[in-house]
Amino acid sequence: METIHFIAIGGSAMHSLAIALHKKGYKITGSDDEIFEPSRGRLEKYRLLPAEWGWFPEKLSAKTDAVVLGMHARADNPELLKAQELGLKIFSYPEFLYEQTKNKTRVVVGGSHGKTTVTSMIMHVLKETGIPFDYMVGSQIEGFETMAGFYEESEIAVFEGDEYLSSPIDRRPKFHLYKPHIGLLTGVAWDHINVFPTFENYTEQFAIFSSLIEPSGTLVYYAGDEILCKIAQAATGIKTLAYDTPHFSIKNNTTFLKSGNTEIPLSVFGLHNLQNIAGAKIVCNELGISDTGFYKAIRSFKGASRRLEVLAQNGTSVIFQDFAHSPSKLKATVDAVKQQFPEKRIVACMELHTFSSLKKEFLPQYQGCMENADSAFVYFNPHTIEHKKLEPISEEEVFRAFGKEGLSVFTDSGKLFQEINSLKPDKTALLLMSSGNFDGINLKEFAKSLIENQ
């Protein structure tokens, strides 16, 4: 039995990979300086939770077959230094995913937005049609216990392709390491300003991704993105297939996808999700799934966790949680809810939480993103900015950057939720958007209370 040690085992992708390999029969050890839920509970369930927090070089020996290094660790991590001293095989998790699946047909979904959802859609359709597959996705998906899985009988691997760095000692974007047979790109909108300081530098990573598709492979891309169109035109030695917004209709707050004379009711909505479905369909077609099989399966797709996830609702109002944090994601989410619920008052609340979103130079990218909201709120925590060692920003600077008339900016999450609570949301669609958690607010409990006390 091979032994694999995880440095920073508590990460969302790292703990899922550890559990998946444990299920496959590997002996797993690991360390971390702190582990939060849900990673903690899942690792504990499989008896993989470290006995104590911290780094313990003595866990590593010449008998350790491989080390998987998480991005959360630092380059001077004591366990990493011990692994290097012993000459052990050290992988970033994308490198290890490739090693596990190098003899399989690899599908990789990249893009600045929508990659989790498209990956989830492909996974859902494959599962519904009974096709075994390996996978890695960046969110919890209904019907899948963990966010990664590997199986001896599968001949396909489906990965979400993140453009962020692979590890502290490997500065390549993660999605450059998978070498897909089928690559899908959803769109390019500047993000990760701390790693890619210019838009040109950022877009270059997607061109490189397309060049790493296996010879005679396929690039699937969104036709409405000019940058992707240029990347596709420049691609050589691969097939390129474009997708766009499919025909649809909205009746009684339900979106129907049109296929010929047939209308397929969907559990998701929004132009961005319709485009995601169109891209996922092409990938599934390339994997041998018919249009009929795809449409039958996609009807029951309810979305990934924290992607327009319904927290609470009644006959007149609905409260969503969404992962939207970058300008393109924020605009797409607000616009989708406005289009789906034209009769409701749209209240949009978002938290500036990521490095890029809190950087003064990046704030102007948010101009006009919340224009379709009837009421808009933005929250940020000055202590988060200090922790990330960024230049302070003011409420006035945030207000000017968004350019939204009537926008309210808060630096105290308690006061923000008091304000939302006072709205009495009758005939309202409330959007709570963040890649964080508004400083520990239990959004499900808040939403339930708000609906019940309406």
Image: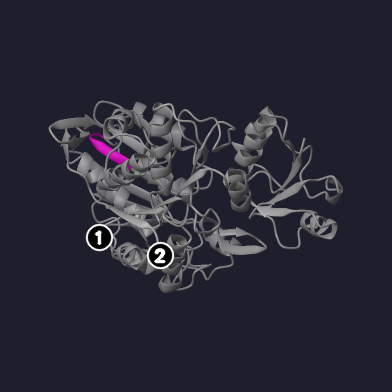
Q: Quadrant of residue 112?
A: bottom left
Q: Is residue 38 magenta?
A: no
Residue bearing mark 1: 405
Q: Name which residue type carries label 1.
A: Glu
Q: Quadrant of residue 166?
A: bottom right
Residue nearer the viewer, 419 or 107: 107
Question: Residue at (40%, 27%) from the top-left corner?
Answer: 128
Would you call the spot at circle 1 few (<14 residues within 10 Å), some (14-19), or many (20 or more)?
some
Would you call the spot at circle 2 few (<14 residues within 10 Å), some (14-19), or many (20 or more)?
many
Q: Which residues are magenta?
A: 426-430
Residue nearer the viewer, 160 or 233: 233
Q: Quadrant of the C terminus?
A: top left
Residue bearing mark 2: 190
Q: Is residue 429 magenta?
A: yes
Q: Quadrant of the N terminus?
A: top right
Which SS type dominates the magenta stretch?
strand
Please say if 82 is above or below 127: below
| Image x and y of residue 235, in percent | 37, 64
Secondary structure beneath dot 1 equals: loop
Residue 37 in sight from this viewpoint: no
Q: As drawn, is 29 to the left or to the right of 330?
A: right
Q: Name which residue type carries label 2.
A: Trp
Question: Residue at (52%, 47%) from the top-left corner?
Answer: 439
Question: Residue at (38%, 44%) from the top-left corner?
Answer: 118
| Image x and y of residue 24, in percent | 66, 32
Q: As drawn, is 68 to the left or to the right of 217?
A: right
N-terminal label among 2 and 1:
2
| Image x and y of residue 130, in percent | 43, 26
Please say if 9 is above or below 125: below
| Image x and y of residue 441, in percent | 50, 41
Of badges 2 and 1, nearer the viewer stands 2
Alpha-carbon span between mark 2 and mark 1: 25 Å
